[in-house]
Image (tube, rainbow, N blue to C red):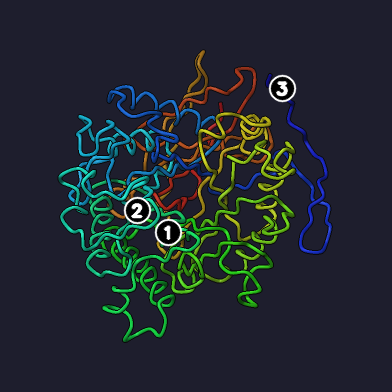
Amino acid sequence: MKVRQKPIVRFLVSLIIGTFVISVPFMANAQHDRELRAVWIASVLNLDWPSKKGLSAEEQKQEYMKLLDDVQTMGMNAVIVQIKPAADAFYPSAYGPWSEYLTGVQGKDPGYDPLAFLIEETHKRNLEFHAWFNPYRITMNHTDLNQLSADHPARKHPEWVAAYGNQLYYHPGIPEARDFIVKGIEEVVKHYDIDAVHMDDYFYPYKIAGQEFPDQVQYEQYGKNVFSNIDDWRRDNVNQLVKQINQTIKAEKPYVKFGISPFGVWRNAADDPTGSNTKAGVRNYDDLYADTRHWIQEGDIDYIAPQIYWSIGFHAAAYDVLADWWSNEVKNRPVHLYIGQAAYKINNNFDPPWSDPEEYGRQITLNRQLELVKGSMHFSLKDLNKNPLGIKDRLINELYSKPALIPQTPWLDSTAPKKPKLTKVTGDNHGNLLHIQDHPSNQKSKETAYYAIYRAEGKKNKTLLATTRKTNEHQTFLDKTADPNKRYTYYVTSADRLHNESKASKQKTK
């Protein structure tokens, strides 16, 4: 039985930060005007969408639209959708076959272009679409090339393929394989209206005890004359991939962001005195050959979203300790920091704090206390939709009850559009109808992607009411929440796709 609680206006929570115990005010409505609120929608193994293989195109579409409704209801402003889970594709591609997670058969055309549909529906709701790629992974549970579809690039280039554990991977150390991966991402950037390219924590595979990744031959061929040890060569392979992807994206569309969500620990302090005060068994630098610090310092990414999938105060890797450590990593760098949060752990008895209904809210509150944390990514949508310990209700009623704009990326672009006109506001039984006209010069110099609608009641400060995608030079927005017995003042701004916001229009009162 689910119990809905009324929003709590204020209460105090104690958080252990390092060796200090501090009292943090938790304000139900202390929400930032700008913060990323994103959720992962995983397709691998049909985790989030589609819910199973072999659904009809119409069933897949209806499922996705329902998920977007859920995302909007929870106050999110971005989705991260896995479109290349295992060297395959959710779109017609020259760099991978149709994904089996669509039709149940790898290489089988689903009868429509899922990615085009996903982006269109996402943008209709003015949510950002981050296209999620897994660069190296080819299979999930076998090492037989012959099980791949006949047109699979891995079958045409078996020399690019490595078997490790019970999976196949493209060799990170082969330059031709790296170029192929980059071209596969370029294809999507070029042909689809995405907002960001996203990768998660899968670079070199997580280590298997007693098994070495089979790349000694490649090291001898490509790396031994340059690097004194194989580990440095492996890190350089990943560094080159990351830099090349970013350069390729920006050459095609400078406004498309590139972000990575790595494992939550770069290195422990025991490995490096500048590492985090953690005792994690896995480290990006040493085990996955993912030198996250290098990418940040080189400006090869626009955002980093470490997966801090532990509770506050957890002995081996504490959420609070790591959020603070990552904040220092991005200080004075043109890189946004978001925190990947483990919605899947809520009430799952991983460790006692996850059974506390306040834990997840405390994490979001802590994020908002840290100036350089610009928002959250939640894994994953199905877990939030299950509403464990009432977290979905909390997001709707408290934590994300007010809309937020996505943070700007001034290193990519800082020029705002010209302000629009709010020509009139009319009322009827359905609410107040705002009539909006874009500034003529925005057609030439700065394209408006969406409008931000602000409302003030009486003498109160104006607050963000909603955002709405621009569809025409003249369009309307219906404020369905308006009380017919109250008088409101409205303002509208124009924003571009990198969330640079114009000055406010002249006000209209209704």
Q: Is residue 218 above or below residue 451?
A: below
Q: Name the residue at the front extreme.
A: 210
Badge 3: residue crowd in 10 Å (few <14, some 14–19, many ≥20):
few
Q: Is residue 98 above or below residue 510?
A: below
Question: Who comes first in sequence, dot 2 or dot 1?
Answer: 2
Q: Dividing the image into 4 quarters, which one contains the N terminus?
A: top right
Give the residue at x 40% y 29%.
51
The residue type indicated by label 3 comes to Val
The quadrant holding residue 180 is bottom left
In the drawing, does residue 68 fall left or right of residue 340?
Answer: left
SS of the residue under disc 3: loop
Disc number placed over residue 205 in the picture, else none:
1
The residue type indicated by label 2 comes to Arg
Disc number placed over residue 133 in the picture, else none:
none
Q: CA distance from mark 1 to mark 3?
A: 42 Å
Q: Which residue is mark 3?
A: 3
Give the residue at x 72% y 38%.
355
Contact between labelled residues 1 and 2, with CB atoms less than 8 Å apart: yes
Q: x and y percent of residue 287 in the render?
A: 50, 66
Q: x and y percent of residue 265 in the render?
A: 58, 63
Q: Nearer the viewer, residue 336 or 21?
A: 21
Question: Who comes first in sequence, dot 2 or dot 3?
Answer: 3
Disc number placed over residue 137 in the picture, else none:
2
Residue 85 visible in the snapshot: no
Q: CA distance from mark 2 to mark 3?
A: 42 Å
In the drawing, does residue 414 fall left or right of residue 346?
Answer: left
Q: x and y percent of residue 74 in the render?
A: 56, 33
